[in-house]
Image: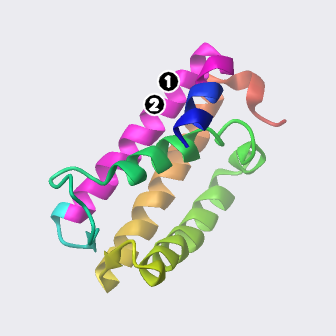
Amino acid sequence: MTCLLIIHLLIVREGEWKLMGCFAITGICMDTIWMHLGLVHYPENTMYPLLPIWLMLLWFAVSTTLTHAINPIFRRPVLVTILAVLIAPYSYSVGAKAGGIDITEAGYYAVAAGWGTLMFITSFTIKYIRPDMVGL
């Protein structure tokens, strides 16, 4: 994953750096807050009070898809928000079934609200930071 991030950072445009950084840091902050509120727990986290390194890297990996693989859905902020609200809790439940996380029922609601808000804001941020990428 680290190699993927390094290669991606070598080929991105200036505006994309800002977007990736803001997205990943916001996601890391959301997960950290949920962890400290007891909504999400990472059983094998040896870095507490920080998130596990694999999760921080995952946030940066997801940020590399924003202006590429998932860019077309950002043209429709309401659609991207609905998809995030539905899909994000499911991905956390998969992590829970795999044993990587423990999540409370309230945690699923927090994940849905957090991801929905993040993706809604990101859809407008992409238009500002990388207007050339919108609509491709």
- Residue 36 higher or lower than 128, as above or below: below
- Identify residue for label 1: 18
Is residue 117 toward the left or the right of residue 37 in the image?
right
Q: Which residue is mark 2?
A: 21
Q: Residues within 10 Å of mark 1 (few under 14, many from 20)?
A: few
Relative height, residue 91 to residue 118 (above, below):
below
Residue drawn 71% across the image and 51% down it: 76
Q: Is residue 46 above or below residue 109?
A: above
Label annotation for residue 55: none
Identity of the amino acid at label 2? Gly
Q: Is residue 20 left or right of residue 107?
A: right
Q: Name the residue located 46 percent from the left edge and 84 percent from the top edge.
A: 97
Whether the magenta-drawn stretch holds residue 25 is answered as yes
Q: Residue furthest right?
A: 136
Query: Which span of residues is magenta-colored?
Result: 9-35
- Disc 1 vs disc 2: Cβ atoms closer than 8 Å? yes
Where residue 7 sits: x, y (%)? 64, 26
